[in-house]
Image (cartoon, rainbow, N blue to C red):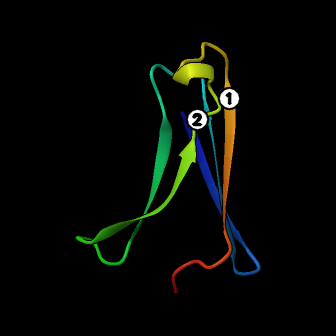
Amino acid sequence: MVLKGRSDFGVNTLTWNTQSELNNSHFELMRGQTKDVMSVLSKIPTKAANGTSSTPLSYEFIDEKPSA
């Protein structure tokens, strides 16, 4: 998996690619309030049919309200 992030004008964008997926239902993106406390920011459903893919898939999440 290739994971990239960028911040532009107060908006954070996270993109990632998978080469394949097996029995995957979603990706869970988490944010840390502190080094010990994490919370779920978003659940991104898989694009893979029935959760399995042998071809590359691309995903993107835009966080318009990132933590300070």
Left or right: 52 as drawn, with respect to 39:
right
Residue 2 point in image, percent of width and height: 58, 37
The answer to which quarter of the image holds residue 31 is bottom left
Check if mark 2's residue and mark 1's residue have beta carbons within 8 Å. yes
> Residue lying furthest top in this view?
54
Left or right: 62 as drawn, with respect to 52:
right
Residue at image point 36% right, 67% down: 39
**Residue 37 makes an appearance in the image:** yes
Residue at image point 62% right, 50% down: 4
> Residue lying furthest bottom in this view?
68
The circle drawn on residue 57 is: 1
Q: How many marks?
A: 2
Dot 2 falls on a residue whose secondary structure is loop
Q: Compared with residue 17, is residue 14 higher up or lower down, i.e. above or below?
A: below
> Residue lying furthest right in this view?
9
- The crowd level at tag 1 (other Cα within 10 Å; few <14, some 14-19, many 20+) is some
Q: Compared with residue 52, is residue 38 higher up or lower down, i.e. above or below?
A: below
Q: Amino acid at mark 2?
A: Thr
Residue 41 point in image, percent of width and height: 48, 65
Which residue in the protein does label 2 denote? 46
The answer to which quarter of the image holds residue 23 is top left
Q: CA distance from mark 2 to mark 1?
A: 9 Å
Earlier sequence position, callout 2 versus callout 1: 2
Residue 49 point in image, percent of width and height: 63, 21
Q: Compared with residue 45, is residue 37 higher up or lower down, i.e. above or below?
A: below
Residue at image point 58% right, 77% down: 66
Q: Quadrant of the N terminus?
A: top right
Left or right: 11 as drawn, with respect to 38:
right
**Residue 20 makes an appearance in the image:** no
- The crowd level at tag 2 (other Cα within 10 Å; few <14, some 14-19, many 20+) is some
Dot 1 falls on a residue whose secondary structure is strand
Q: Amino acid at mark 1?
A: Leu
